[in-house]
Image (cartoon, grey):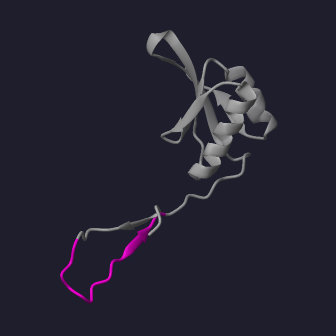
Amino acid sequence: MSKKEKIKGVVYSTNKDFSFDYEKEETEETLPPRPQNLKLFLDRIGGGKFITRIAGFTGNSVDLEALGKTLKQKCGVGGTVKNNEVLIQGDHRDKILKLLIEADYKVKKAGG
């Protein structure tokens, strides 16, 4: 059983003819860059530190991880991907905006 297959409802059965029905997770198809509506936010976390948050990505987690890895490498900083958002350490909105526009994404700054 792979990680994407989940058993639904039954933990144990005494019926010898019982077979588990595996439920496969649907993988969301990733949109091409142009129809994506990405938004850049600047958030303050504990200790007065800033993070740049990229929200609005429509697609599967593998492609989002790849985008996050590329942005972290181009900015030369750390970060993570959580809750369908890319979090980059520091205030890199201008650089990320430029990189995403060059990659043909539809992106804009959001928030105050």
On the rendered structure, is 12 left or right of 51?
A: left
On the rendered structure, is 66 left or right of 19?
A: right
Q: Quadrant of residue 75?
A: top right
Considering every residue shown, the one lying at the far right of the view is: 102
- Magenta segment, which residues? 12-25
On the rendered structure, is 103 left or right of 7?
A: right
Nearest the viewer among 42 and 45 is 45
Residue depicted at x 52% and y 42% = 84
State the predominant SS element of the stretch in magenta.
loop
Residue depicted at x 26% and y 68% = 9
Q: Is 13 located above or below residue 96 in the figure?
A: below
Q: Is residue 29 magenta?
A: no
Q: Is 100 located above or below residue 64 in the figure?
A: above
- Percent of width and height locating residue 56: 57, 40
Nearest the viewer among 33 and 14 is 14
Quadrant containing the C terminus is top right
Quadrant containing the N terminus is bottom left
Q: Quadrant of residue 105?
A: top right
- Percent of width and height locating residue 101: 77, 34
- Percent of width and height locating residue 2: 47, 66
